[in-house]
Image: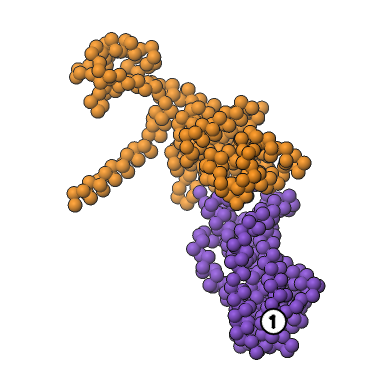
């Protein structure tokens, strides 16, 4: 099977800013691919390039076998997009949105009605299909957008931050639909997010994007293995650190906020040995590696920037209180 | 090049929305009605065309004014669409920018024609009797007028970044186009500089054609007005397609 997407040195510059920096990427058919990165990392720009909404500065990509530079309309016929910001028409009903979209995407007239009902059913909006979209909740809008993105049966579906700004229940809802699509297996899904758990629970593979480059690309499990290790916090009397530091499965031990922070392999198996060596322990906290940690490791500078901002605000607050 | 299903979809969207925003339909008629019933009656007694009152003389101009206001406003509305991401869905569709532009322009034209019909009905009741054929001819004439002015609105809307420019466009473009067009006076007796400016004002030809249809008086021969209008339609279509081609995502 040919890949759903292949990019070749895909680059987009806005003036001096390189938003997407010669990305080479291959996404298999039927795969759910997660693009993970902080705000401004280039996720949306990459999606916009692949969806032919932006022209590449250099390089190219094949989407569903079509070249984004030479056959943009063919690319568009084969993709569906759910944008970051809501783009369903409030002044129309849910059904009307789907109907107009089908006409725009050239769905054969005879099939439109049947597909509309099927999609409404899939996202459970049948009962509200004839209400104006302005009366929908955020989650319902998102579901309508997903239905709209799928009604022309695209080969590739782009979901740009599909759960941004949704309440937890609606987010779970959207996840359920995405998993349903994944199980059906006909559609390749490219998902951008800055929620680690979202990428972790949905994606087959994850690309971590930072400053326009893919800095790491693997399955969620492999990425977690690369960061490698679990973290155990021990609240215990002074001197304990010396007792446990030399244990073979411990790779790092430091004192942090009055407790000990240990990085170790496989906390499930080694915790017992650790506690035995440590002796008198007041409190134990175990943290399995999450994609948060992966992200911190590979794109850590962004977080650092944020801390700097934070301390800036603290300084402002301080100088205000001194006055 | 043309995707008729898509043009139909774009047109239907405007039609569906149009009839749901009844306040907008009424709001657009306010200024023209003030001109027709206050200026038109207040200045009565000095009609340039024999056999017709001043109010009847400016009636065709007011019809064009309605189209002008409806269509320019519609065109500028795509700035909202751009900012609210509604346009994104359409920009991402597998349709050419020519198709998109035509769909949007025809959708906007629809509003202008419906407002024209409303005003003609009001006119029939209070200003002058109109036989059915005149009414239909008037509606036919409003087609190129509405199309041309919608195009102008869309061209400006496609290039503008924010709604703040809306007032500027109304002050510096819409009102001058209206006043220089001879909607309220006879160009034949106007000061020379007005006549010169009027030559370059597309609304002049719209008013002149409409006046010829309604009261049989024109500053230009009707075919010249019609020809000029069709010329403006062609030019604004070309400029509009180019302007839409240049719309890009901003991030």
Chain that is coloured orange in the picture: A
Chain B drawing hue: purple
- Return the x and y of residue B145 as percentages of the image width and height: 69, 69
- How many numbered discs? 1
- Return the x and y of residue A55 as percentages of the image width and height: 57, 48
> Which is nearer the eye, A247 or A240?
A240
- Return the x and y of residue A205 as percentages of the image width and height: 53, 28
Where, by quadrant of the figure, is residue A313 drawn?
top left
Q: Secondary structure at mark 1?
A: helix
Q: Is residue A138 left or right of residue A315?
A: right
At 35% from the left edge and 40% from the top edge, which residue is drawn?
A306
Q: Is residue B64 left or right of residue A238?
A: right
Q: Is residue B73 above or below residue A103?
A: below
Q: Which residue is mark 1?
A: B56
Q: Is residue B37 something that shows in the picture? A: yes
> Which is nearer the eye, A264 or B115?
B115
């Amino acid at each position: 099977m040919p890949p759903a997407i292949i990019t070749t040195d895909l680059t987009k510059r806005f003036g001096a800013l390189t938003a997407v920096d010669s990305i080479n990427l291959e996404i298999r058919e039927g795969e759910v691919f997660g693009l993970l990165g902080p705000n401004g990392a280039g996720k949306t720009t990459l999606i916009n390039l692949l969806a032919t909404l932006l022209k590449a500065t250099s390089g190219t990509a094949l989407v569903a076998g079509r070249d984004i530079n030479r056959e943009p309309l063919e690319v568009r016929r084969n993709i569906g997009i759910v944008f970051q910001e809501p783009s369903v028409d409030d002044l129309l009903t849910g059904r009307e949105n789907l109907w107009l979209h089908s006409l725009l995407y050239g769905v054969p007239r005879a099939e439109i009605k049947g597909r509309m009902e099927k999609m409404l059913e899939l996202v459970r909006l049948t009962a509200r299909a004839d209400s104006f979209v302005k009366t929908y909740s955020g989650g319902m809008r998102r579901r309508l957008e997903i239905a709209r993105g799928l009604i022309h049966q695209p080969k590739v579906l782009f979901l740009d931050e599909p759960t941004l700004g949704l309440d937890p229940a609606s987010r779970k809802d959207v996840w359920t639909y995405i998993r349903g699509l994944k199980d059906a297996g006909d559609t390749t899904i490219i998902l951008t997010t800055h929620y680690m758990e979202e990428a972790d629970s949905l994606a087959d593979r994850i690309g971590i994007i930072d400053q326009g480059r893919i800095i790491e690309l693997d399955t969620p499990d492999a990425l977690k293995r690369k960061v490698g290790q679990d973290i155990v916090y021990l609240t215990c009397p002074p001197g304990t650190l010396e007792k446990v530091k030399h244990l073979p499965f411990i790779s790092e031990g430091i004192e942090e906020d009055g407790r000990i922070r240990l990085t170790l392999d496989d906390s499930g198996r080694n915790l017992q040995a650790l506690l035995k060596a440590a002796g008198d322990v007041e409190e134990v906290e175990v943290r399995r590696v999450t994609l948060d940690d992966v992200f911190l490791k590979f794109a850590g500078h962004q977080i650092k920037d944020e801390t700097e901002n934070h301390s800036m605000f603290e300084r402002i607050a301080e100088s205000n209180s001194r006055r | 090049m043309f995707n008729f299903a898509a043009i139909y979809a774009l047109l239907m969207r405007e039609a569906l929305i149009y009839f749901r925003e009844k306040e907008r339909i009424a709001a657009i008629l306010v200024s023209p009605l003030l001109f027709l019933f206050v200026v038109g009656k207040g200045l009565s007694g000095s009609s340039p065309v024999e056999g017709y009152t001043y109010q009847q003389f400016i009636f065709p101009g007011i019809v064009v004014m309605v189209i002008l206001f409806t269509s320019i406003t519609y065109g500028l509305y795509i700035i909202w669409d751009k900012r609210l991401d509604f346009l994104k869905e359409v920009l991402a569709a597998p349709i050419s920018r020519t198709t998109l532009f035509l769909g949007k322009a025809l959708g906007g034209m629809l509003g202008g024609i419906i407002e024209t019909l409303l005003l003609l009905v009001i006119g029939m009741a209070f200003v002058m009797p109109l036989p059915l054929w005149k009414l239909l001819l008037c509606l036919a004439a409003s087609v190129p007028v509405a199309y041309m002015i919608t195009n102008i609105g869309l061209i400006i809307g496609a290039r503008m970044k924010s709604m703040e420019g809306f007032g500027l466009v109304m002050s510096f473009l819409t009102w001058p186009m209206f006043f220089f067009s001879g909607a309220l006076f006879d160009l034949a007796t106007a000061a020379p500089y007005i006549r010169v400016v009027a030559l370059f004002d597309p609304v002049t030809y719209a008013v002149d054609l409409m006046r010829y249809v309604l009261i049989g008086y024109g500053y230009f021969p009707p075919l010249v007005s019609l020809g000029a209008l069709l010329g403006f339609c062609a030019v604004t279509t070309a400029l509009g397609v180019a302007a839409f081609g240049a719309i890009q995502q901003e991030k």
